[in-house]
Amino acid sequence: MAIINEHTVKAFDADLNRLRGLISEMGGRAEQALIQAMSALANGDRPLAAEVVEGDKAIDALETEVERLAVQTIALRAPMADDLREMIAALKIVSVVERIGDYAKNIAKRVALMDPARSIEAIPLLTSMSSLVAELIHDALDSFAARDTELALRVTVRDKTVDDFYNSIFRTLVTFMMENPRHITESAHLLFVAKNLERMGDHATNIAEMVYYAVTGERMEERERGEQPEDGAAEQE
Amino acid sequence: MAIINEHTVKAFDADLNRLRGLISEMGGRAEQALIQAMSALANGDRPLAAEVVEGDKAIDALETEVERLAVQTIALRAPMADDLREMIAALKIVSVVERIGDYAKNIAKRVALMDPARSIEAIPLLTSMSSLVAELIHDALDSFAARDTELALRVTVRDKTVDDFYNSIFRTLVTFMMENPRHITESAHLLFVAKNLERMGDHATNIAEMVYYAVTGERMEERERGEQPEDGAAEQE
């Protein structure tokens, strides 16, 4: 940054901190949306589910604000390599957080489609799975705020447990469907909820990978990565 | 761009054209991956499915190349508002195309998990659905290459037909599961294939929305949009 004057540097840092603050707020809302959506699902609480659906608009609005600020900052401050990489990472991370919010909204929308009395076998497993996923989202965003590559690496490792949860829920639900053909529609919805949670874990991993790249300028090693999004491996073994 | 000298402008245009070329190549590969994955699924062709899985690496490598080139261009040329917006759009579009490739890989991976003789009821519907989705991906990328907002708008409108396909496949598969409890695992895989196709259609819509924003500087009207990704509406009614 040597060739840039101090004022520009200070202004850039201010913009960057504002960006970080907006992304933390977005991440907090997405994490909260997931927790509320799962509680609405477990308790058949449709008003709470409707709240989650409505609340997703605030997450989308934050994404738009972050994009405007990031593009404006790049245009005005013409940041150097490292800072530019952080700006680009911020842009990519908010689009992932926005998707995590969409998945929470998706889970919440299913509450109205289901009879809460049905397919409850899988609910406790789904609840434990979602607690872990919420943790991974939280840690992935903390790793961004703190530029903590160690924490980012731990997120990608723990995502494998999310895939194990998914495998066992997939088997539980398929067995339940076989035994209760009349409840297949509800079980199919829970199958998608489980898949949504698995995808959210993958997205937490994506954020961790972006943080790792933004901080180190290197891609995370394949062997250190969690499963790639939607590669179907979650049903394999 | 008045304040930038002609050499910089020419150099920027060259970078932009190279970016566009890489994105078209990526999009063509993703579209091809979808078509091959569906043909592998319909014919139980495991070698072809394995080819699709292997081919996804080339798509991921193209994404990395586009990101490097875009960040380098922004850093070297410090493009003005419109050009910067186009660069940012390019970065966001490649990450969506990469995800479309992952969905095709996901479909291909399921071929090895399934007995092709089973749940074939849904295959013709899935094949028609995937032809439409491949078209939308193709048109969305053409709208980017040609900066064609009309074509972009048509993509978002036609995505609603993809959701209709999804609804009818969801019902077909649930009915089939009820009648054939022994084939529930295969049907569940096809349910995810249908959901993957629906998501690919949503991603084509996302690309169309980004093109619209990059060209006009305005967001596409909600009323003109296709369904948001994974909002669960596709199973409703």
Image (spheres, coloured by chain):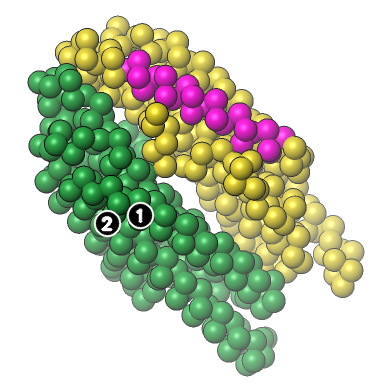
Chain colours: A green, B yellow
**Residue at point 18%, 39% (across, down):** A116
Name the residue that disc number 2 marks: A36
Name the residue that disc number 1 marks: A52
Q: Which badge, 2 or 1, comes first in the chain's sequence?
A: 2
Q: Quadrant of residue B123?
A: top left
A76 relative to A96 in the view: left or right? right
Q: Are marks 2 and 1 in contact (CB under 8 Å)?
A: yes
Q: Residues within 10 Å of mark 1 (few under 14, many from 20)?
A: many
A43 relative to B162 in the view: left or right? left
The main secondary structure of the magenta stretch is: helix
- Is label 1 in a helix, a strand or a loop? helix
Residue range of the region highlighted in magenta in the rendering: B151-173
B28 relative to B235 in the view: left or right? right
Q: Quadrant of residue B88?
A: bottom right
- Can you name the residue that lies furthest to the bottom here? A6
Q: Residues within 10 Å of mark 2 (few under 14, many from 20)?
A: many
The amino acid sitting under disc 1 is Val
Residue A27 picture location, percent across and down: 38, 64
The amino acid sitting under disc 2 is Gln
